[in-house]
């Protein structure tokens, strides 16, 4: 009986849990996408310092300068590829305050986030099902063993008395 109730809960609860949490995560991520798109923009910046170091693999820190839409000239530090010459142009993302930041989150990332969270909710629902089933089996086994102990306490004296004669 308990197994059937658990299976019914799993069959009905798994899709509900996965869809509701996945859609909630997707909607939340899309709000983040919209907020970041509204507050960030891409500008063309010019490298104003020499890139030091012989490392050909990792990026190096370099000073850059760009002009905002309203004509204000700003400077900042960002990572550039090895061997980037002074005066090279590059595209960087900046926020409303003119601080260098990363690219805004996109809709593909929001969708992937929703799928991931929904999938994790489904896995948690299945894990909860198996945990509840294991806990119930453990409780039933302990109850059976306790009953067997009580019955053995009643039967054992009669049983052992039989062999003493």
Image: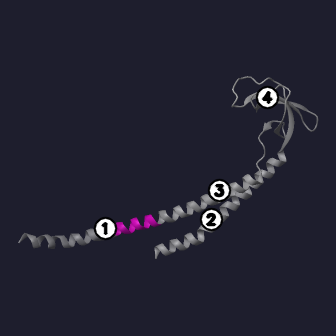
Q: Which residue, given by chain and number where applicable, does mark 4 sit on?
A: 84
Count of numbered marks = 4
For label 1, the crowd category at 10 Å Cα-Cα, with few meaning under 14, some 14 to 19 and many 20 or more, is: few
Q: Nearer the viewer, mark 1 or mark 3?
A: 3
Q: Secondary structure at mark 4?
A: loop
Vertical comparison of 149 with 36: above or below: below
- Asked if the residues shown at circle 1 and circle 4 are in contact, with their CB atoms under 8 angstroms apart, the answer is no
Q: Which residue, given by chain and number where applicable, does mark 2 sit on?
A: 17
Compute the Cα span from label 3 to label 4. 38 Å
Q: Which residue, given by chain and number where applicable, does mark 3 sit on?
A: 116
Which numbered disc, 3 or 4, marks the residue that appears first in the sequence? 4
Horizontal side, residue 63 vs residue 16: left or right: right
Vertical comparison of 144 with 28: above or below: below
Q: Nearer the viewer, mark 3 or mark 4?
A: 4
Which mark is drawn over residue 145? 1
Picture residue at 59% right of the left edge, 72% below the top: 12
Seen as rendered, the residue at the extreme right is 71
Q: Which residues are magenta?
A: 133-143
x then y, percent, for residue 66: 87, 32
**42 vs 57, nearest the viewer:** 57
Picture residue at 52% right of the left edge, 61% below the top: 127
Which numbered disc, 1 or 4, marks the residue that appears first in the sequence? 4
């Amino acid at each position: 009986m308990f197994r059937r109730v658990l299976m019914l809960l799993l069959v009905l609860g798994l899709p509900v849990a996965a869809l509701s949490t996945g859609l909630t995560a997707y909607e939340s991520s899309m709000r983040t996408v919209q907020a970041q798109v509204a507050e960030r923009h891409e500008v063309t910046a010019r490298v104003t310092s020499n890139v030091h170091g012989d490392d050909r693999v990792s990026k190096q820190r370099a000073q850059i300068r760009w002009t905002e839409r309203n004509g204000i000239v700003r400077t900042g530090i960002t990572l550039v590829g090895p061997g980037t010459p002074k005066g090279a142009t590059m595209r960087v993302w900046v926020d409303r305050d003119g601080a260098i930041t990363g690219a805004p989150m996109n809709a593909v990332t929001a969708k992937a986030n929703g799928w991931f969270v929904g999938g994790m909710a489904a896995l948690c629902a299945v894990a909860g099902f198996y945990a509840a089933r294991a806990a119930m089996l453990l409780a039933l086994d302990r109850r059976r063993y306790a009953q067997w102990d009580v019955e053995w306490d009643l039967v054992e004296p009669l049983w052992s008395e039989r062999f003493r004669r």
